Amino acid sequence: KFTLGVSAICEYSDYDSIQSIDFPTLTDENSADLLMLSIPDNYNGGINVTVNGSPVVFDVPPQLVNDRIMLPMRAVFEALGASVDYNDGVITAVSGGKTIIHTIGESTVYVNNEAIETDVPSFVTNGRTLVPLSFISEALGADVQWVEETQTVVITLN
């Protein structure tokens, strides 16, 4: 139930009284879903991502591919404070004393020259390299959680 109070001052009224207003019965045609007003700016109809509590905005949205969440690497790494460089299919990211080297299309990530295998290889879509969610936690040591109810990836780096 929703209650609305309306107050008005009538300059030309010679009396001060409370008036009632009859509002129509709400239907799908004359109402709006207020939950739609609280959707984060980065909502793309699919997967949302926060890094240390802040939403990450992507120019290429995260994707679900073969039951794996794939995230645009540069946007997430930069949100985590890493510098990211791309050179001829090889991505190098530096963050907190770690150097991460990854060749697009491979499932191996090198963290300070130590090989780490991810569950699926990266790929490029619309000029962005998408990496599996596990890549973030394994490469940077970040805590990564999936919140099914809101379709949100929560990444925290301490």
Image: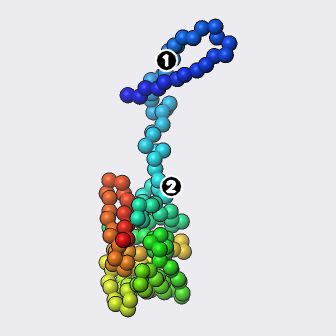
Marking on residue 59:
none
Tell me the quarter of the picture where residue 107 sits: bottom left
Residue at 47% in and 82% down: 93
User: Which amino acid lies under the numbered mark 1 shown in the image of this protein?
Assistant: Asp
Depth check, front residue: 68 or 77: 77
Residue at 38% in and 89% down: 112
Marking on residue 41:
2
Q: Is any atom of residue 79 visible in this view?
A: yes
| Pointer 1 or 2: first along the chain | 1
Where's residue 66, x and y in %? 34, 69
Where's residue 39, x and y in %? 46, 50
User: Which amino acid lies under the numbered mark 2 shown in the image of this protein?
Assistant: Asp
Question: Can you say whether 8 is above or below 127 in the image?
Answer: above
**Residue that numbered label 1 is attached to:** 22
Q: Is residue 66 left or right of residue 76?
A: left
Depth check, front residue: 54 or 96: 96
Name the image quarter holding the N terminus: top left
Residue at 32% in and 85% down: 116
Residue at 44% in and 72% down: 80
**Regarding mark 2 in the picture, which secondary structure is present there?**
loop
Name the image quarter holding the C terminus: bottom left
Where's residue 69, x and y in %? 37, 68
Tell me the quarter of the picture where residue 88 sits: bottom right
Where's residue 32, x and y in %? 48, 37
Residue most extreme to the right: 12
Depth check, front residue: 36 or 63: 36
Q: Is any atom of residue 69 visible in this view?
A: no
